[in-house]
Image (cartoon, rainbow, N blue to C red):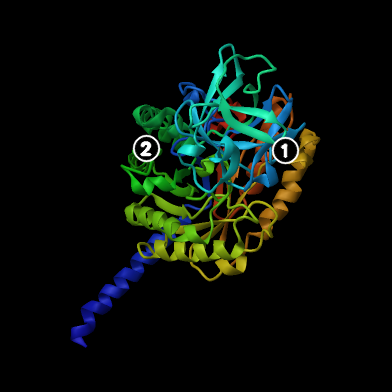
Amino acid sequence: MAHHFPLTIHLVLCLSCVVTFSLAQSSNLPFKAVNLGCWLVTEGWMKPSLFQGIPNNDLLDGTQVQLMTTKLQKYLSAESGGGTIVVANRTSASGWETFRLWRVDETTFNFRVFNKQFAGLKGYQNRIAAAATAPGNSETFQIIRKEGDPNRIHIKASNGKFLQAQSDTLITADYEGSGWEDSNPSVFKINIVNTPQGEYQITNGYGPDKAPQVMQDHWNTYITDEDFRFMSSNGLTAVRIPVGWWIALDPTPPKPFVGGSLKALDNAFTWAQKYGMKVIVDLHAVQGSQNGNDHSGTRDGFQEWGDSNIKDTVAVIDFLANRYANNPSFAAIELMNEPLAPGVTLDNLKNYYKSGYDAVRKYTPSVYVILSNRLGNSDPTELLSFAGNFNYVVIDVHFYNLYSDEFSNMNVQQNIDYIKNQRASALKTVTTSNGPLSFVGEWTAEFARNGASMQDYQNFAKAQLDVYGLATFGWAYWAYKCQYEHWSLKWMIENNYIKL
């Protein structure tokens, strides 16, 4: 027996470490947290000034444009949504008439169509078709804007000649004249429908010479030691930090992304420890894009994350868990922010969550693993029994009284009642006594009421604090800083709109 005695002691010690650590973890719960949004994953709507120095900053990657020929007064259209010729026979614009830009440089672009092919020059009679599955030289076009009227453009093809609409069904790249009059078949009016402003757009917009400095300056100044001091002294106990998949390939991530966000995340852990706060690392942007939103790191808004991306996404989680597993401030890791149904299937999501959980557990037995519920049309309880198979797991739900018609006509009291009834009920459905913990990982005190008073905002915020305070893992306000005052928890605290 004597031979086995040290091993027995060692096992007991290890188990007691786990128990002590997990009790320490639990004693912090529920967290009062804030999201450090727009720090390590850019969101232009929160800080538009980041994009101001980009030339042609209304023509970024993923910008959706519609192109009307002034001569025919009709829109260019990828016939059948792509796979065949480009025509100019529509008097109004919808999906087939909308092109997504891939930016090559500040004046040069590829045009991606509805079915994801790229428009390009076909050898036959210099016709334009949308059939290429990847862009090459033939799919690269220069946009020349008229001085003083930037939405009036010529489009130069790779053969050095301009696109022209010869007829409804004949679009060719063989015009050699000039001029801007309506009767000129090479003049188009560009209608910009949507300009995304995420990490891909800012880094590719500034380009490899300027982007590294712009991002470094932003990371160094947007969140600092002083912010952690402010947060901790105002009752916040944790931060949820959105990160992008490229952080795992720091300091030289694939272009156009730039290195440096990993050092910023390291700093956050240092500051959190200094002020007694915990860190929730949230994988907000994944390769392929899980929701098509700017903040998913997408190039053009197509949602393409699926089975083929699982291995690479797990590798990011593995990297982060390995790096921070022994850091006393590391409370939780969220495997993916806001997967969107039906594009992200439940099967793929569960396969990924299982593999991601296993990756984390290689390094730590009791850092919480957070599973985000799917957005879109999905059952809010769909992960509950699945999550019951794991230890120290959390279900994350996001609640905004925005982004849906049902909120646009509600008065203040109806918004508050909605929190106390529908939101309380929704939270209860994912809060179990012996299964995963519940987390309201995003919410805000902004709502769809113009002209609401300070008292209205205070009441709306308090109603949410009261209800979301029942989440067993806690809540995280979106966000700490934002150009829009009510979205900024820092502003809300400083101006007495909210008391934690």
Mark 1 highlights which residue? Answer: 94
167 to 443, vertically: above or below: above
Q: Quadrant of the N terminus?
A: bottom left
Q: CA distance from mark 1 to mark 2?
A: 35 Å
Residue 481 image position (x, y, % from top left): 51, 31
* Mark 1, other Cα within 10 Å: few <14 / some 14–19 / many ≥20: few
Q: Residues within 10 Å of mark 2 (few under 14, many from 20)?
A: many
| Callout 2 amino acid | Val
Q: Give the residue at x 70% y 22%.
A: 70
Is residue 25 something that shows in the picture? yes
Amino acid at dot 1: Ser
149, above or below 131, in the image: above
Residue 51, how many percent across, how many down? 49, 25
Furthest residue toward front: 125
Seen from the viewer's position, the closer of residues 199 and 396 is 199
- Residue 184, quarter of picture: top right
Quarter of the figure with the C terminus: top right
In terms of secondary structure, where does tag 1 sit?
loop
**Quadrant of the image occupied by residue 346:** bottom right
Mark before the other along the chain sequence, 1 or 2: 1
Residue with the mark numbered 2 = 258
Measured from the top left, where is residue 391 in percent x and y? Answer: 48, 67
Name the residue located 53 percent from the left edge and 49 percent from the top edge.
133
Q: Residue at x 76, y 44 (%)?
A: 418
Foreground of the two, 397 or 300 = 300
Q: Residue at x 33, y 52 (%)?
A: 327
Q: Nearer the viewer, mark 1 or mark 2?
A: 1
- Secondary structure beneath label 2: loop
